[in-house]
Amino acid sequence: MARWDQIFSLPVQNPTLPEFSSADLVWSKVEGYRDNIDRLALIPYTRVDDFVRGESSNKDCPTSFHVEARRRKAKGKKYKPKVDGILEYILYWCSFGPDDNRKGGAVRPSRSTYVPKKNNAGRPNSKRGCRCHFIVKRLIAEPTVALVIYNNDKHVDEKGLPCHGPQDKKAAGTRAMFAPYISEDLRLRVLSLLYVGVSVETIMQRHNESVEKQGGPTNRDDLLTHRYVRRLERSIRRSTYELNEDDDVSTSMWVENHQSQVFFFEGFSDTDPFSLGIQTEWQLQQMIRFGNCRLLASDSRFGTNKLKYPIHSLVVFDSENKAIPVAWIIAPRFSSGDAYRWMRALCNRVHAKDPSWKVAGFIVDDPFADVTTIRDVFQCPVLFSFWRVRHAWQKNIFKRCPETETRVEISRHLGQAVDKICRRQGTATLFDSFVGDFVGSPEFVEYFRAVWSPRIGAWTSALQSLPLASQETCAAMELYHYQLKCRLLNERDSEAYQRADWLVDKLGTKVHSYFWLDEYSGKDNFARYWKEEWVSGLTSFRKAMSIPDSDVVLSGMSAKITDECEGNKIHVVWNPGSQFGVCSCSWAEKGYICKHMIKLTQQCLGNRASMQSASLLQYYQTLIDLLRCPPRDSLFRDYAISLAVSVEKQINAPVNLQKSDANEGNLQKEIAFSEPSNGKSLDEYDLLDKHEGHGGVATDLDGELSKLPMSCLRACSENAEEVILGSEMEIEPSLCSSKAAVENVTSTTPNETDSVNENCERGAKRLKIWAPEQGSV
């Protein structure tokens, strides 16, 4: 029992790396059976595969590990709990062992029937007697922890000599120099190219050209064979999504065969509906890479009118601020209880790989989204994106209103109504007057009454209660929505849309392949094979940044933009500066916001005489609301007191002129460092949720105090005319006088001081700062 007491006292190590090896762990030596000393460590059971992949990527001796033996307890079988009881036992062995098929090598008795093939010893199917192996045990006492026993960590044979890799001189010039199999990255690349329709010959031709450019093979991936690619192509061609005539049974069979891609699954029952969460290993890596301290967005209810079950997508934004899907949730309905379960499962899966992962903000596009659950699970502010409604309105305006003048007027009135609601200058009744003004366009009015009038109140409430996402976010979501539509809904037989097994199979194969290739740097080598589904490129927001100002000509209520990318073609934009503009380009005719409208919006926001955006106005309005809080519940007044105490101490302390100059320089550096940066994309400044009346978010006080900009603190200084974040505000002098704050502090009793601290802590827990859309002044 002393052995197990010592084992359970060891810490569970969880490196933050996507893949880790034995070199990243601290190994302990514990007395084992038969007086042996075991070299072991504890890691999370969910990260065993990461350890196996990391150990296979050894630079000194590249290899791969296979499961040589496995034993596990049967599911549902009752067993007596024991301290040393084992739920699962897995023996991983280097793929170059344990048998030795070289001349004079030893083969286990069970393999004595092996007939040597006429090939050199460096072939991958040849064993070279490598003794490197490790054992993984999943204990009954700690099912979430894996005990790794790694006594033989050297890639040597029975004689203690290197048997493969660069250190083996006899392996020079053979494939034993490299790993026995291609890397997972190359395998995923080949599969993705095959799924999107690139031929085997083209893949091999491009691969051989790249190997020749680098002067010959340098690793195992360079030895890719035509036979291997052909075998993958054949397996894809012979596969089918319909594993059973019953759709539910077929979907359950798919889940059993793809356990690594499923993070949440609930089959049909009398009480709970069907619910399935899909996330591949690559998507998990992208979620950790681009989602940590950044934004996570939701594209809800895709395919509601065509698919058997709608798709709920979660996306992150890459370095070019394009949306990458990191999870797909398929369910007939999205209730609060269902959302909590799959969100918690997804969050736990990410934290199993990176415990420090934390999202900065969550963007929803559905007014009925469970905001409370999102805040509870992800511990972050929630923003609202209006792109889905704007896209539906614009698409139907072009579809149902043939005249350009009618399109412009309807768009302008809808834009003004939405803008007034965001500025808290109107309610949902604005749309009632809109319907009465455009009785001359019966098609669109009937569509608006039937589809949007019953639920416009929910959208209005969301616009006023949640901070708005930026225009760049909307452009990224629109591009993702269009990509998913082209890549998923392109079947000739529409009956397939009514099967869930088809949906999960295509998401995990073809659709996933397209999005993987979007991030592949060598995708341009296959440009001639691109189809309509392979639509990619920058978002409209990024494209607008490349349009020079000289190509824009404003004239009243319209503007002309010369598009150099389309052979200097001139596009006309009506309602310039509005998200509800009307453009003559093909992208705008589909209902999306085009680069020409965004360019005009950026120019108008740069003009101080123009109206500020709704996002910027919400930002300033929230700061004003905070300044007008009751005295005992004001975060800024608590900060004024804290700042006044600091000023008083500095005045009373004897300092020389040199120190004073140094402190002044440091203060200027702090102020310059704390100023908001216009170069940061999307909404990835700190996010501001409304205070208690609008559902604030409770977060830890530590770390949040330092996020308040120095320019906000300057509002509490002696000069009451200082600006907050570059905008002039009317602030009471009593709020800004540090002298008055000093007097208040010196006359405060201990109980009152405790009350002030409590108010400060409560106020800090409500405050999150979000920045207006990029380009705002």
Image (cartoon, rainbow, N blue to C red):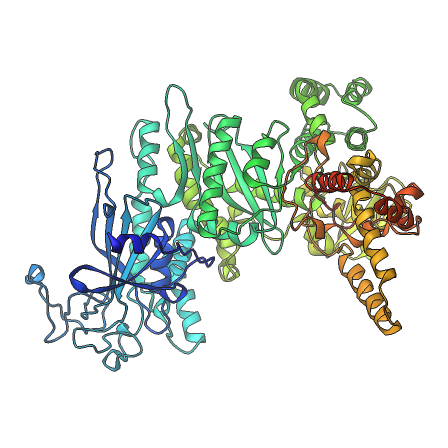
Asked which quadrant contains residue 735, the reply is top right
- Give the x, y percent position of residue 440: 79, 19
Is residue 713 or residue 604 the one in the foreground? Answer: 713
Residue 392 lies in quadrant: top right
Q: Residue at x 83, y 71 (%)?
A: 659
Q: Nearer the viewer, residue 556 or 634?
A: 634
Q: Is residue 490 visible?
A: no
> Can residue 167 be seen?
yes
Q: Is residue 21 above or below residue 213?
A: above
The reply, left or right, for residue 672 in relation to residue 566 is right
What is the residue that sits farthest to the bottom in this orientation?
169
- Direction from residue 745 to residue 221 in the image, left or right: left
Q: For this view, does 452 lie left or right of residue 256? A: right
- Which percent across, then down, holds residue 214? 44, 76
Q: Nearer the viewer, residue 762 or 66?
A: 762
Q: Is residue 15 left or right of residue 424?
A: left
